[in-house]
Image (spheres, helix red, strand yellow):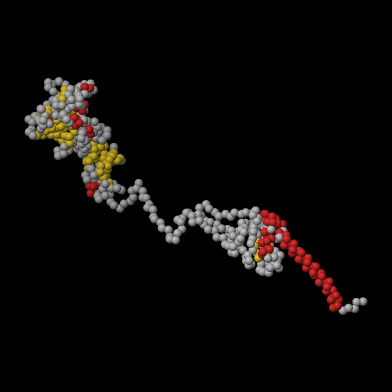
């Protein structure tokens, strides 16, 4: 029978208990040593690997057995951890205060692009280029096959890995903006761009239009011409630019634009149809507006009603005794105008010569005696026209040494040097008493007029050399015929006929 007291029994069992506790402690140490050799993968398990392969954006927090941050980094850097146990991108590993190295909990976050050395507290800040492209959107590049590497901080910290989406921070985005000037320390300055103003449509104006011409008149007509004049009221406007003439085939319009005449108050409308009546108005114009219409005027085209001078001719100095013989229709009678003398004929008001199609007037010489000789002997004369008997314009001349002034007439071939036999010409140049066939001869078709009075030389104002101004208004009312002062005999003039 064991009569030993309980205390003695405990004392006897104490060595066995110490041995048992020592054995348990060895087992624990062996287990912990195994953890150190196999790395963190032994604790995380295959479920973590499966998660990492399925979703790189998942964040998993695993609390490890007590181990210091240095050991975690060493475990992750081993070949086994890299090949089979390395946590994937987005994994957060938490280590509580360790048994090996006391300290606070250490948290490591695995990222998609690890770097060998992490700064203490880096913070990613996306920086936009000064002139970002409108289509630019920042993207992150992942490298899932590259194992992450960590370097423990000497002191326990909570490292934050850059460029990793982590709640509650939203992903970085950019809003495209138009290119802007290069940033500088001074505010940008802008120069306003002038805005073009269309001039196709007149803009409204508060200025009153110019006054309309108070009168408009048709003062002369021919087979294809109508000559008009009007009063000058519009030109008194300060903004006046020009007069504009309009025409219609019916009274009251509608009117079509004919011509702008500037400040001129006269115009000859040409190219019309003979025997037709036309209606006209004229307007004064500013840059952006016109006046009202002038009173309407009308005219009818047709043959010249009075082609010959009506007032008695004026001869001077001294007056030849037969001056009046040249002042009517050509009839075979003639006026002798001696050397240095002149003869002035008046076609009458509203009956001046106009510049129309073809020849505009005819100058009649006397047939060389005896009658029925069939030729005219040209004398040295100059034919001039005037609107007012003040300014005279030479329109034709037959004179040796001035052959170019015969170019306006139909007898210009007879002024050639040498004489042209194709026209039956007998003398070189514009010689005195040069003979011109009244009828056809070779290429020559004959002089103007009805036989036996076909002694007219037709003249075209537009071919005058030198040129003369086109007639306006009532036309060239006055004709002056002068004989050259050194002419060997008088000029024998039978008359003048207006053709336009």
The quadrant holding residue 71 is bottom right
- The residue at the point 61 percent across, 54 percent down is 142
Q: Position of residue 19 (x, y in %)?
A: 82, 70
Q: How many marks?
A: 0
Can residue 477 be seen?
Answer: no
Q: Position of residue 238 (x, y in %)?
A: 25, 50
Of the 4 image quadrants, the one containing the N terminus is: bottom right
Instruction: In this rendered view, identify the residue nearer to me: 235 or 440.
Output: 440
Q: Is residue 237 above or below residue 125?
A: above
Q: Is residue 454 above or below residue 161?
A: above
Q: Is residue 76 above or below residue 288?
A: below
Instruction: In this rendered view, identify the residue nearer to me: 401 or 77.
Output: 77
Q: Position of residue 274 (x, y in %)?
A: 25, 32
- The residue at the point 20 percent across, 26 percent down is 417
Q: Is residue 143 left or right of residue 336?
A: right
The quadrant holding residue 409 is top left
Q: Position of residue 189 (x, y in %)?
A: 41, 58
Can residue 193 be seen?
Answer: yes
Q: Is residue 291 above or below residue 331?
A: below
Instruction: In this rendered view, identify the residue nearer to me: 255 or 136.
Output: 136
- The residue at the point 17 percent across, 36 percent down is 393
Q: Is residue 315 left or right of residue 469?
A: left
The quadrant holding residue 162 is bottom right
Of the 4 image quadrants, the one containing the C terminus is: top left
């Amino acid at each position: 029978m064991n009569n030993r007291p309980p205390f003695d029994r405990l004392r006897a069992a104490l060595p066995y208990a110490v041995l048992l506790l020592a054995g348990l402690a060895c087992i624990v140490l062996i287990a912990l040593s195994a953890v150190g050799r196999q790395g963190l993968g032994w604790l995380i398990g295959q479920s973590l690997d499966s998660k990492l392969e399925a979703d790189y954006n998942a964040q998993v927090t695993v609390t490890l057995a007590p181990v210091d941050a240095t050991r975690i980094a060493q475990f992750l850097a081993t070949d086994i951890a890299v090949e089979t146990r390395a946590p994937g991108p987005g994994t957060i590993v938490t280590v509580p205060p360790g048994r090996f190295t006391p300290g606070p909990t250490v948290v490591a976050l695995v990222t998609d692009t690890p770097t060998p050395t992490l700064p203490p507290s880096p913070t990613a800040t996306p920086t936009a280029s000064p002139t970002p492209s409108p289509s630019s959107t920042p993207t992150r590049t992942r490298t899932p096959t590259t194992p992450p590497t960590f370097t423990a901080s000497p002191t326990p910290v909570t490292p934050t890995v850059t460029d990793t989406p982590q709640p509650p921070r939203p992903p970085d985005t950019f809003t495209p903006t138009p290119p802007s000037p290069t940033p500088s320390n001074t505010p940008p300055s802008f120069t306003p761009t002038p805005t073009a103003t269309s001039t196709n449509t007149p803009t409204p104006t508060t200025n009153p239009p110019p006054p309309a011409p108070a009168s408009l008149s048709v003062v002369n007509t021919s087979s294809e011409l109508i000559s008009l004049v009007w009063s000058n009221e519009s030109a008194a406007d300060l903004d006046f630019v020009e007069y504009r003439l309009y025409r219609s085939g019916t009274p009251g319009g509608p009117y079509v634009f004919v011509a702008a005449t500037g400040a001129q108050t006269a115009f000859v409308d040409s190219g019309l149809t003979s025997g037709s009546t036309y209606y006209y108005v004229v307007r004064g114009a500013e840059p952006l507006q016109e006046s009202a219409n002038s009173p309407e005027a009308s005219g009818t085209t047709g043959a010249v009603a009075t082609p010959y001078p009506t007032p008695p001719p004026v001869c001077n100095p001294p007056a030849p005794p037969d001056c009046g013989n040249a002042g009517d229709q050509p009839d075979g009678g003639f006026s002798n105008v001696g050397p240095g003398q002149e003869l002035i004929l008046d076609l009458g008001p509203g009956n001046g010569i106009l510049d129309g199609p073809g020849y505009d007037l005819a100058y009649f010489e006397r047939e060389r005696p005896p009658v029925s000789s069939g030729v005219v002997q040209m004398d040295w004369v100059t034919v001039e026209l005037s609107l007012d008997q003040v300014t005279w314009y030479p329109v034709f001349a037959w004179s040796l040494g001035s052959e170019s002034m015969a170019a306006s007439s139909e007898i210009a071939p007879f002024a050639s040097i040498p004489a042209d036999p194709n026209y039956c010409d007998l003398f070189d140049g514009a010689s005195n008493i040069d003979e011109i066939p009244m009828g056809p001869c070779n290429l020559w078709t004959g002089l103007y007029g009805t036989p036996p009075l076909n002694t007219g030389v037709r003249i075209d104002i537009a071919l005058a050399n030198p040129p003369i101004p086109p007639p306006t208004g009532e036309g060239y009312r006055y004709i002056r015929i002068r004989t050259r002062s050194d002419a060997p005999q008088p000029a024998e003039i039978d008359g003048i006929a207006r053709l336009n």
